[in-house]
Image (cartoon, rainbow, N blue to C red):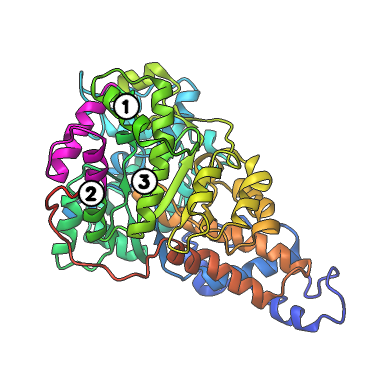
Amino acid sequence: MEQNANPRLPVHDLTLRSHIQDVRPTANARERAGSALLHPDRFFDSDPAVRRAARAVYEETSELPLVCPHGHVDPALLAGNMPFPEPTALLITPDHYIFRMLYSQGISLEELGIPAREAGSGKREAPVAGDPRRVWEIFAAHYHLFRSTPTAAWFDYELHELFGITVRLSTATASRIYDELRERLASPEFLPRALYESFDIEALVTTDAATDTLEHHRSIRDSDWNGRVLPCFRPDTMFRIAAPEWRDDILALGKAAGGEITGYTEFIAALENRRRYFKSMGATASDHAVVEPYTARLSSHDVKAFFDRALAGQADAEDQRLFEAHMLMESARMSVEDGLVMQLHAGAYRNHNAAIFRKFGVDKGGDIPVRSEFTRNLEALLNAHGNDPRFRLIVFTLDESTYSRELAPLAGHYPALKLGPPWWFHDSIEGMTRFRERVTGTAGIYNTCGFNDDTRAFCSIPARHDLARRVDANWLGGLVARHVVDLDEAREMARALTYDLPRAAYKLDASVRKPISTGELVA
């Protein structure tokens, strides 16, 4: 039993004690917890003083709408609003966190129903290859592998909170749970749009290729549904001039923009054209993924020469490195002019497992973090645009060693630079806590962007946000218990991290403009 008086708090601090000593999980909080399998104090510190403060802070944010400014949910899901076929296709096959762990233990992707690529194309087969129930049973039999991982925290929330499952997933319960889930998925309240509304999502941003027609976004906006689903402009493939498929991508870009691309000038005009179209469809941001966040501006002569070599199929890896560095500068210049927030995701070595990539394609768990450097690599870009109030750059990294050494000092100085939340491998209880501890002293919280879920697994969205809110509440509760901040300040900080900062950083409070046609290619 906890004591009403906390011996760590000074006797004279009656205000703080009166605020936190009697905070207990409310009836509503217990109801939100779903079943007894989800403890209302989960992820909070065992220290009573921290735990009491964490509860109070969490109550400030637990009912706030979800702001989802960066993710990979397929907009076709919400455009079509069709019932999910069955549990495996919904909960397992879209989630590479799940099958990368199982693969590491010797379970093949074929056993998990991951469809192979068709020969000579990137097209996929059916959502689940083989027997979905068998895949579910394999997953359940190995669910112990995920203990203490964020995947288990998210998945338990989905089962118990979203679907109302009251038993733990195991070999013994797998078939029963599968049948219960399949029955629920057939009901109207589990249609994609109904789930979107039950999750209380305020805005959901997808990630879309520069050549995407955005037909599903248009379908959503033309419907009588009020859900806010916005695109995000991602031109990465257009910058990879040494890739074998690059010339096909350029042809597609020209077609989408309304004109043939015969040189670098037309290429830049086509990108600007597509950015305008995305913005007219509600986009507020662009996204750029690189291994190395190197930025440098090339001379007009050099960049045109690189582009011409690429058109001739003669560009090499060093050409691409320099071209990508130049195009990050150009993307920043475009962001200054059109107002799209620029995101930069750095440090993922993609498709490390060549055999898996050849057979199954991208996003199959074979991406591995590498060391990153930002101070020198971003110098050209930040000196060009980092002081401009029209520009905003949000940086993500998979190299935690840069948090306190480089990123927090940079964000604590340049007005344009904000730090994205812990990403991918660091989107965990410990990872989010380390991030707060390493950047706050130098950058504060107001040079960060709160949280984004960054997921393809639609039903994991509320689970990921709940975990982030609890981890931040616990971190703030520790500051309250140590008298670094007062409880009222911690509540304000929690609301900022949960709601205010992501809305502001991604300009999601801006009005949505009427869509336009792609129009003519404009120089």
In the foreground, 491 or 305 = 305
Dot label at residue 305: 1
x, y percent for residue 450? 52, 60
List the residue tagged with mark 2.
274
Task: Tell me which corner region of the image, top left, top right, bottom left or bottom right, holds residue 124.
Answer: top left
Give the alpha-carbon distance from disc 1 to disc 3, as whole Å: 42 Å
Q: Quadrant of residue 89?
A: top left
Which segment did they paint magenta? Answer: 244-273
In terms of sequence position, does the residue under pointer 1 or pointer 3 come before the other? 1
Q: In terms of secondary structure, where does tag 2 sit?
A: helix
Q: Is residue 317 left or right of residue 347?
A: left
**Relative to 25, is 67 above or below?**
above
Identify residue for label 3. Answer: 457
For label 1, the SS is: helix
Given the image, on which type of amino acid does mark 1 rest? Ala
Report the residue at 61% width, 48% height from top.
407
10 Å crowding of disc 2: few (<14), some (14-19), many (20+): many
User: Residue at left 44%, top 52%?
Assistant: 453
Give the number of marks.
Answer: 3
Q: Is residue 336 above or below residue 139?
A: below
The N terminus sits in image quarter: bottom right
Mark number, residue 482: none
Q: Nearer the viewer, mark 1 or mark 3?
A: 1
- Residue type at mark 3 is Ala
Q: Nearer the viewer, residue 421 or 50?
A: 421
Q: Nearer the viewer, residue 137 or 289?
A: 289
Q: Report if residue 308 is visible in the image.
A: yes
Disc 1 and disc 2: Cα gap in Å?
24 Å
